[in-house]
Amino acid sequence: MKNEYVTLQGNNISTSQRYNGINYFGAHKSAFSNDQRIIEPVILTKHYLPSVISAFNDKLRLYNGKKRLPRKDVDELHHTLIFDGWVYLNQGYIGGNGFRELSIERMVDYKDDEFVKETEPLKECLWENDVLIDLDPENFNHQGLPKPKAKSKVQEFKKGENVYFFHPVDGAVARFGAISGGAYLYCYRDPRSSNVALGVFVCSEGTQKNLEQLLSIIKKAKLSPDGLREAIQLRDAVNLICKK
């Protein structure tokens, strides 16, 4: 595949798995060292999967920046996500004050040999295992997990249309897997596990950080029209560099 990233929701998301063969923690270290972050379930379930499926069915165009992905790349990406993907997602589960006394934990950086983490209470979600969820973005909450009543009425697997779900477990992390016989969003996996076929999808973090910093500078500096034009040119240059 010629295009290494697809641009969705302001993020450049990898079109292939990265950092195969290392566990959840090692994959995060590798991603952060390359100014990347592992995608979260919400990016996968509400944006990445639906967008790729729609593009495969000629209902949406996918882009790498401003460059449209050719049909061949769309087909390869669709095959990875629907038939041959096995990845960790950036979401762990710990005891907390959320739904079922759990909280979500995400890795946001790695500094001074320690992970920087952010947590939030787990929101109410479907609490069943081995049940099918239709791949409609509206079936998933803002944490990327199925809503309480999102269980498919017809429990029959249809490739590219639904996914098996397993609810969160304390001490576990989320994974997504797709093979010829099914697709799985399972939130009970051991973060210490590794396999040569198990990797991650990453998104480029440098672009987003630089743009956020630039917008903050513009707001604080109260730039003139000429200054704003120069800032926009700088933003575009930074964006281009970070996509390379």
Image: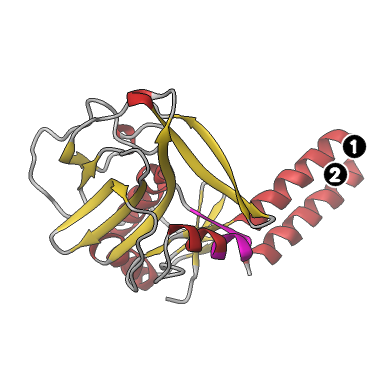
**How far from the left and from the top, in percent, is residue 69?**
45, 66
Which residue does the image show at 52% across and 58% down from the upper left?
28
Q: Is residue 41 magenta?
A: no
**Element under label 2?**
helix
**How far from the left and from the top, in percent, is residue 104?**
44, 36
User: Is the residue 15 above or below the residue 103 in the image?
Assistant: below
Pointer 2 and pointer 1: residues touching (CB < 8 Å)?
A: no
Which residue does the image show at 31% across and 66% down from the upper left?
80
**How far from the left and from the top, in percent, is residue 113?**
64, 57
- Mark 1 crowdedness (10 Å alpha carbons): few <14, some 14-19, many ≥20: few
Which residue does the image show at 39% across and 45% down from the upper left?
41
Q: Which residues make up the magenta segment? A: 30-38
- Report the amino acid beneath label 2: Leu
The residue closer to the viewer here, 13 or 100, is 100
- Report the amino acid beneath label 1: Ala
Q: Which residue is mark 1?
A: 221
Q: Which residue is mark 2?
A: 228
Q: Quadrant of residue 149?
A: top left
Q: Is residue 155 left or right of residue 97?
A: left
- Spatial distance from mark 2 to mark 1, Cα to Cα? 10 Å
